Amino acid sequence: MRIVRADTDGADAAAAVLRDGGIVVVPTDTVYGLAARPTDSGAVSAVYRIKGRPDGLPLPVLAASEEQVRSLGVAYDDRVRALATRWWPGPLTLAFAFDPDAPRPSWLDGRDEVAVRVPDHDFLRGLLRRTGVLVVTSANRHGTPTPRAADAVAAALGPEVGLVVDGGLLLEVPSTLVNMSGPDPVVEREGAIGRDAVAAVLGSAP
């Protein structure tokens, strides 16, 4: 397993591993994440296997921009726009329903919703602009804390990970997850953004 820096050479190496169907550990603005291309079923299966994640838990998605998010065919209303304007890029994950009139990628067929975030991390957004959206989940064994340092992540996850991008010592605070797929938004996980702050923005939405 290689460990590279979060710089131009590291981005080149990460893009190459992902393109070849490999798994990459990437730094984010919250915790280290296990990343794979969503169109590569073998890589996605490897993420589940490496992490020990239950099959019934869909993987969240990271995107470089709102444009990439909208390309997933999600339902994008005024409440979403208000939250995205306030916290994207940033530690806010939104779970979307799909717009029945919008096309969606085939890898999302059969799904009722998808959780997406635009991270506040220059290296990662640059990588996402090159690769397109990636499925990314915290780089830990399911049910255990996420290591804060790249070498600790590498030791915990083992040789199936093709590359680790070292972004330094990261936080242990996850993103806040707000489910927007129902009639009313629901905070399903309170993380870096408080529940009251989310409610305040939603209360001022058109």
Image: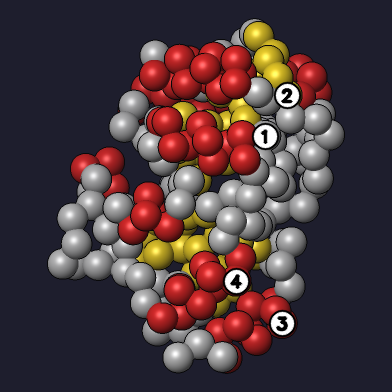
Q: Which mark is residue 170?
A: none
Q: Which residue is mark 2?
A: 166
Q: Which residue is mark 1?
A: 27
Q: Which residue is mark 3?
A: 196
Earlier in the chain: of badge 2 and badge 4, it is 4
Q: Amino acid at mark 4?
A: Arg
Q: Which residue is mark 4?
A: 86
Measure how far apart labels 3 and 2 are at the Cα level: 34 Å
Q: Amino acid at mark 2?
A: Asp
**Is residue 13 visible to us here?**
yes
Earlier in the chain: of badge 4 and badge 3, it is 4
Residue under the point 39% across and 14% down: 20
Q: Amino acid at mark 3?
A: Asp
> Which image quarter is the C terminus in?
bottom left
* Crowd band around label 1 with a 10 angstrom C-alpha radius: few (<14), some (14–19), many (20+): many
Residue under the point 71% across and 47% down: 30
Check the image and report above or below for 73 versus 39.
below
**Is residue 44 visible to us here?**
no
Measure how far apart labels 4 and 1 are at the Cα level: 22 Å
